[in-house]
Amino acid sequence: MRYTVLFILSGFLFHFTLCAQKVGERVWLHTDAPAYHSGDRVHFKAYILDMDEKVSTAQSRYLYVELGKDGVMVGKRVKVQETEGRYVGYMDIPEDAVSGVYSLRAYTLGMGRAGVFSYQDIQVGRPHHLVCENADTTLFSSFSTLNIPIRLGLTPQRDSAILQLDMSGLLEGEWADLSVSVFNGGHRPLPPYGTSAADRGALEREVTQTLCGQVLTSRREKPVEDAKVSLISPQAGIFSVTSTDKDGAFVFDGLDFPEGTQYVLRTDDKRLLQIQETVYPEYASSGRCYRDEGWAVPFPEWPDDAIELDAATAVATAVVDPPKGFSALADFSFGPNQISDMSATCMHEVLRRVPGIFIREEKAYLRAAVSIYGDFPAAIAIDGVILEGDYDLDCVEMSDVERVDVFKTGQTVIWGARGGAGVISITTKKGDFVPQQASEYLNQKKVTLLGYQRPAPYKPSAQTIYWNPAIRSDVITFPMPKDGCLGICIEGVTSLGRIVRYFVKWE
């Protein structure tokens, strides 16, 4: 009896372990074309599918997409933020990319940590048509499919086409989230589905961007409890202060800002500040092989003619830039429009407009920052990094300045003890200014997280005639080329979890 109970319990624990390790997400990418030139931009829409519930999901706020070839990642990793339940982004192919088959690898945080990835193949350059021998066509076989036929016609007296979607296959109350691409050539795209063999680890949803670290003593590097750590980003206009736990660890969350946003972390003097680096999974190929089937239709060349837009005349008016975030705590602020109206040639001309500031020996002093030991110059911070006290403000090019904020007193919680005599904060337009005279402080770190991708307008290319990642009507109009055949691909997921994938060649 005892062995029977133990056998049942062991079986239950084994089943529970398998359920806990199961990763229930897969990513399906729809690209605007199956083939590109080097230096092109690949536009895509991602559908994240819940393999357990058999529906699309947007519970993970971010999607990661990488471009690779032969098991090596090329270019840079992009992070796509969920917007209105959709994941729409783009990937730039490097200018020096050689011809061949590349793979777009897509995954959520939970998938990446579990070693599960989805792959979408694209062709770059002018190769022959390669057909995949061992594509994983069963990846979404558990989903029911729905074909949405289309009708294509020409608009009278216009060089445009009308695409009519037949939505009669939808059930009552069912709706479809669709994307459509129309590209030159009409050649059959490579099989789009693939996945890694691994399937392990608990699924973890990513709902916000976080930054972690630790504060240690500068000599013996022991954890410091209850140490104050401040975070500031002049680009994003934010600041925050937190305290370390008993292990000296701290966490800042809610850092959901675009790519390129930089943050400055600062703690008390005589402390060692360490940042926990974000670890991303190594790139690996999809493990497919291809056979050469020949290229039926010539790959389209770039058009020789270009469209030249008429010159536009802009009329400027004086606009006051309202301070935001940490700038709202400054005693005086100058935004980009105010700086432009000043026509200042150097930073000293801007600072002379601030009451209580005087310039002596090329240093700026605040009249309130006086002690029995004499005057102390205000600290200079560029893009959140405090510089040496004798930094020459003439080294700052006014054409690079986005805004200037002056903190007199009372805001040392942001800048620490070095801000006691006041701080002149200069924010550059790019936010990545690296002065040669910057101090190397152990208690001050500047980091750049992988922010989400900034939206970019779509521009038709030599390959793609039309791309719409969010179809909102069953009638679509797009420009019609004078000759040649077209490939039309419609993909998506319905609200009831039915997959839509319809490809047609039109001549």
Image: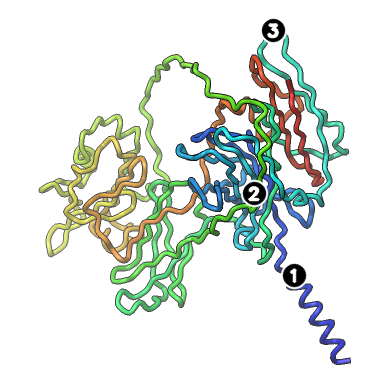
Q: Is residue 16 above or below residue 344?
A: below
- Please name the colour scheme applied to the rendered image: rainbow
Residue 175: x and y in percent read: 79, 38
Q: Nearer the viewer, residue 355 or 308?
A: 308
Q: Is residue 5 above or below residue 260?
A: below
Disc 1 packing (10 Å; few <14; some 14–19; many ≥20)? some
The residue depicted at 82 percent of the width and 52 percent of the height is: 142
Q: Say what amino acid the circle numbered 2 marks.
A: Tyr
- Mark yes or no: residue 85 visible: no
Q: Is residue 112 left or right of residue 370?
A: right
The residue depicted at 42 percent of the width and 17 percent of the height is: 312
Instruction: Quickly name the residue at label 2.
Output: 119
Secondary structure state at the residue bearing disc 3 = loop
Instruction: Quickly name the residue at label 1.
Output: 18
Q: Earlier in the sequence, mark 1 or mark 3?
A: 1
Instruction: Quickly name the residue at label 3.
Output: 157
Disc 3 packing (10 Å; few <14; some 14–19; many ≥20)? few
Secondary structure state at the residue bearing disc 1 = helix
Q: Is residue 58 left or right of residue 435?
A: right
Residue 420: x and y in percent read: 25, 60
Quarter residue 276 falls in: bottom left
Q: Nearer the viewer, residue 32 or 261?
A: 32
Q: Earlier in the sequence, mark 2 or mark 1?
A: 1
